[in-house]
């Protein structure tokens, strides 16, 4: 289980890096478009379409990393006073709720993506197939759901044994 968990951490880290790269690309396209417009140019055709695609990729590909590093915002005034096993049960339940949400996003997203694909929808400016926007959303939602199963198992193992069986992944950088 530990090897599988570490492999999942590595995959979540790579997904997070790809998501961060998408954010970088969105920012670069936007800044470059602004610079070109300020010097009298017409800007970059499709900046809005490309930026929207990159932001969807950023959002849904970084969510798995957030779950694996346990770096979501939480209010734990009550749970910090609980013993280790009680905290682990609360964390397992919390992760399970997050998993249900991500599963619902993925499940209902499939139906919407099928509709978009069937209709052949395209983006407004440069005609990107709108199904492309659904790929990172669905991949991120279902990948996160799979990771959450491992996270819930990790917390349940702590609740059962009373000790940390698998140390959680540490975030690589702190955002201020």
Image (tube, rainbow, N blue to C red):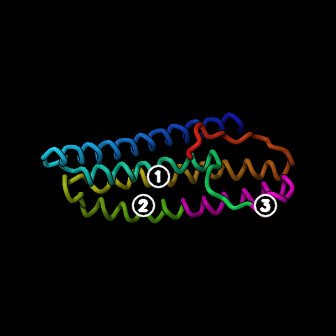
Q: Which mark is residue 60?
A: 1
Residue located 56% across and 46% down the image: 176
- Residues in magenta, as a range: 77-102
In terms of image quadrants, where is residue 39? top left
Q: Badge 1 local density, few (<14 within 10 Å), some, or many (20+)?
A: many
For this rendering, which residue is in front, 124 or 102?
124
For this rendering, which residue is in front, 39 or 127?
39
Is 84 one of the magenta-colored residues? yes
Label 2 or label 3, whichever comes before in sequence order: 3
Q: Which mark lies nearer to you, 1 or 3?
A: 3
Please state if 45 lies on the left or on the right of 170 as rendered. left
Give residue 74's position: percent from left, percent from top.
66, 59
Local SS, label 1: helix
Residue behind mark 3: 79
Residue located 48% across and 59% down the image: 106
Q: CA distance from mark 1 to mark 3?
A: 28 Å
């Amino acid at each position: 289980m530990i090897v599988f968990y570490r492999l999942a951490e590595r995959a979540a880290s790579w997904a997070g890096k790809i998501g961060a790269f998408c954010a970088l690309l969105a920012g670069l396209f936007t800044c470059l478009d602004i610079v070109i417009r300020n010097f009298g140019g017409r800007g970059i055709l499709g900046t809005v379409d490309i930026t929207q695609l990159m932001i969807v990729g950023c959002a849904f590909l970084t969510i798995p990393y957030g779950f694996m590093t346990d770096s979501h915002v939480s209010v734990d005034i009550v749970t910090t006073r609980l013993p280790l096993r009680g905290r682990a049960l609360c964390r397992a339940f919390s992760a399970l709720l997050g998993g249900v949400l991500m599963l619902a996003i993925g499940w209902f997203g499939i139906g919407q993506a099928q509709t978009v694909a069937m209709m052949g929808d395209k983006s407004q400016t440069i005609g990107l197939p709108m199904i492309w926007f659904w790929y990172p959303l669905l991949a991120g939602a279902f990948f996160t759901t799979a990771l959450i199963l491992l996270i819930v198992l990790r917390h349940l193992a702590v609740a059962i044994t009373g000790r940390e069986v698998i140390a959680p992944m540490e975030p690589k950088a702190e955002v201020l």
